[in-house]
Image: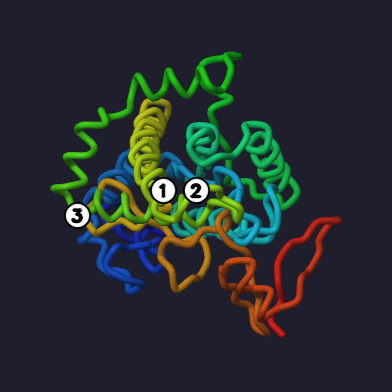
């Protein structure tokens, strides 16, 4: 057990660095000194001998495109990812006595109308996510979503209130996309996801779809920032994680959930393909079907095993 407070932050951060989801490619930085903001965030807890609190926006809902996923409920991808995150917290507890916990800040409701997924499906996904955490005994994980904000108001009204309170203006966001490469990279990535998440049978042309998704991407980014600021208000002291690639020195630490050659891949936009060994890959469902056989778990399709 580490007792020297001067080095504990770097040691804790060192456990995360191999899984850094970075904008510069798959190779992470191995030097904690390249991440001073994360060291500062961790120090907020180690100085007080408190459990380190991580917040991770993500796990919103499954993609609405059936060519990418197996259904609208969590499956093996979420199970493996949550187990990994819980295990990461447990490893921190092995070297830092107060331990660590993580709040999964499910952001599906904040985007529902823009990503074309019903609030009912998002509720079902979130409820099953909680059930999965209980079944697997993932004691370091908690969840937070829009249902815990603004009482019993309808989801549409909650979205409006959160967006009005926190989101940047469209003009400011467009200007930043033109001048800031990180924002531009995020914009391109979100646009690509929105295009890919459109199910087959879209009535318009490809160019019309591209235009629509580019407009929606601005709104998704604005709401993502709004959700992040709301989380910061609810959890004013936390180590801020992100499922999006982040450069060294950023205020957020991008973290991988499962192995993938695509740094944007997530379990809710793909399916798990297991090989003959312990590893697992993320792939589009239509691609997984060509390399593996489908495995069912508890009466639902779960993942593929390579054949």
Locate residue 123, reporting x and y percent: 66, 34
User: In this rendering, does residue 40 appear at all?
Assistant: yes
* The N terminus sits in image quarter: bottom left
Disc 2: which residue: 204
The quadrant holding residue 279 is: bottom right
Disc 3: which residue: 181
Q: Residue at x 57, y 37 (%)?
A: 143
N-terminal of the two: label 2 or label 3? 3
Disc 1: which residue: 208
Locate residue 56, reporting x and y percent: 45, 45
Looking at this view, is 121 or 93 the one in front? 121
Q: Residues within 10 Å of mark 1 (few under 14, many from 20)?
A: few
Q: Residue at x 32, y 28 (%)?
A: 167
Q: Contact, CB < 8 Å: mark 1 with mark 2?
A: yes
Looking at this view, is 219 or 301 the one in front? 219
Please, is residue 218 above or below residue 1 in the view? above
Per the image, label 2 sits on a secondary structure element best described as loop
N-terminal of the two: label 1 or label 3? 3
Q: CA distance from mark 1 to mark 3?
A: 25 Å
Locate residue 220, reporting x and y percent: 40, 39
Per the image, label 1 sits on a secondary structure element best described as helix
* The C terminus sits in image quarter: bottom right
């Amino acid at each position: 057990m580490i007792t020297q407070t001067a080095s504990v932050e770097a040691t804790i951060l060192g456990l995360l660095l191999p899984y850094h989801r970075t904008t510069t490619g798959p190779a992470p930085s191995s030097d904690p000194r390249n991440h001073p903001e994360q060291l500062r965030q961790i120090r907020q807890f180690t100085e007080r001998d408190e459990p380190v609190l991580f917040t991770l926006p993500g796990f919103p809902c499954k993609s609405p495109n059936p060519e990418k996923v197996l259904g609208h409920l969590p499956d093996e991808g979420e199970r493996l990812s949550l187990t990994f995150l819980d295990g990461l917290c447990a490893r921190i507890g092995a070297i830092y006595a107060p331990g660590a916990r993580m709040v999964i800040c499910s952001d599906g409701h904040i985007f529902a109308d823009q990503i074309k997924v019903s609030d009912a499906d998002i509720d079902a996904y979130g409820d099953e996510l909680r059930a999965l955490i209980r079944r697997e005994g993932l004691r370091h994980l908690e969840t937070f979503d829009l249902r815990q904000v603004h009482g019993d108001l309808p989801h549409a009204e909650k979205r409006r209130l959160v967006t009005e309170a926190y989101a940047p203006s469209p003009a400011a966001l467009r200007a930043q996309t033109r001048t800031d490469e990180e924002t531009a990279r995020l914009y391109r990535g979100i646009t690509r996801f929105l295009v890919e998440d459109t199910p087959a049978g879209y009535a318009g042309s490809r160019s019309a779809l591209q235009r629509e998704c580019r407009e929606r991407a601005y709104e998704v980014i604005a709401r993502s920032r709004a959700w992040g600021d709301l989380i910061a208000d609810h959890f004013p002291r936390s180590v801020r994680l992100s499922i999006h690639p982040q450069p060294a020195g950023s205020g957020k630490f991008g973290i991988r959930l499962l192995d993938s050659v695509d740094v944007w891949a997530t379990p809710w936009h793909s399916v798990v393909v297991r090989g003959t060994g312990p590893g697992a890959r993320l792939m589009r469902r239509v691609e997984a079907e060509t390399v593996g056989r489908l495995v069912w778990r508890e009466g639902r399709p779960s993942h593929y095993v390579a054949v």
